[in-house]
Image (cartoon, rainbow, N blue to C red):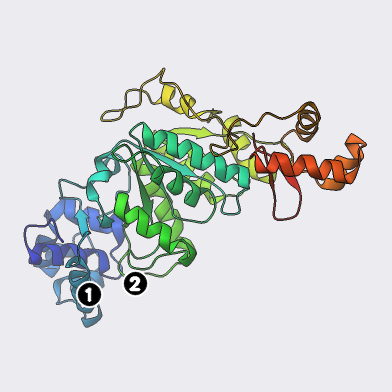
Amino acid sequence: MSLMRSQEELQAWLRLTLEPGVGPVKARQLLAVFGLPDQVFAASVGQLMKYLPQKLALQLAAEPEPDIQGLIQKTFEWLARPGHYILTLADPLYPKALFDTHDPPVLLYVDGRPEVLAMPTIAMVGARNATMGGCDNARAFAKYLAGQGWCVVSGLAHGIDAAAHEGALQAPAGSGSTIAVMGTGINRLYPAANKNLALRIREQGALVSELPLDTPAVVHQFPRRNRIVAGLSKGVLVVEAAKQSGSLITARLAGEMGREVFAIPGSIHSPLSRGCHALIRQGAKLVETAMDIQEELAGAPGSKVNAGTGGAMKAGAVPDHADGFVPDPEQCRLLERMGFEPLSLDELVSDLRIGVSEVSSQLLALELAAYIVRLNDGRYQRVR
């Protein structure tokens, strides 16, 4: 489905984004001079050469190449399916938040519910190889914030991104939503393992991309995706990130756009805490609960976010646990020894000076009650 007034107008918008050598910056410059895209392609070579090299001016003044025309036709076929949209800079549903950025996409492909792009939005990003505790935090924060009327935007990647989308989808129906910004063409779900998650997002929120159909996953595309994640949001929360993480690019872009940047602190020994700690040293706001974000962004237009609302999830909290379980004194002693650092069974046996079977029994009880988790490498980590 298209929100455009005519097929000819939409064809001109598509061609403007598909012509080699144009790019988003030149495209916006041409729109500023000539108006709508069909007026760009109606201009003479002489008029175009005032703003473009001769070769590119001749290219735009001629008929589109067959491969471009073929991709435009394929895009129209994609648009004919339910829930498929293209929003251009001239569309009323184009997200206003992106207009405030220095590099707004010329158009957006949307699969799902385009109206969620008008909601107050919070971005949540972090490590792909996140810890179990980090993913739990992302789900808990996203579920709570979505329940307060926020739309949670992320990048559909493994780890923190996926957990944030999942948490938002768990919020009560009719509250918040979630948007997945893709670094591929809208018809190329990446990573493939998140296909089912993407289908759920499409039903309750939206998949969004600025890239043409069939664009594969290429490394240099993902910073472009990150700028849209940052641009859509009123603030960006970094849950876990290594010192050289792509999430820090999103945070930097958000800061340059005047958005708030939040970070959850972690262990000084964890490599996945160093990016968050670096952001905090640079001025990002340290957060321990979703309430911290609420208080900073309270009163966002259209949201139910109000300072003073109770029930915020705390970092490290696990929402699903054994009801009524209270650790006994020995289990409390074990939890105090663990802190929030991953430890092996041998380390705990050595430190606590009790038998392997007794420590194992305590660990099992605490794991079943969701106080600790067993990591992939066999170590245990406290998460509550």
- Judge by depth and name the residue closer to the eye, 378 or 49: 378
Q: Between marks 2 and 1, how big is the CA–CA gap?
A: 10 Å
Q: Is disc 2 in contact with disc 1, using a CB cutoff of under 8 Å?
A: yes
Which residue sits at x=15%, y=50%? 90
Q: Secondary structure at mark 1?
A: helix
Which residue sits at x=50%, y=38%? 140
- Judge by depth and name the residue closer to the eye, 79 or 364: 364
What residue is pinned by disc 1? 74
- Judge by depth and name the residue closer to the eye, 201 or 227: 201
What residue is pinned by disc 2? 214
- Judge by depth and name the residue closer to the eye, 291 or 51: 291
In the image, residue 139 lies at what x, y percent? 49, 42
Is 6 on the left or on the right of 265, as rendered? left
In the image, residue 197 lies at what x, y percent? 42, 57
Q: Is residue 20 above or below residue 207?
A: below
In the image, residue 209 lies at what x, y percent? 33, 58
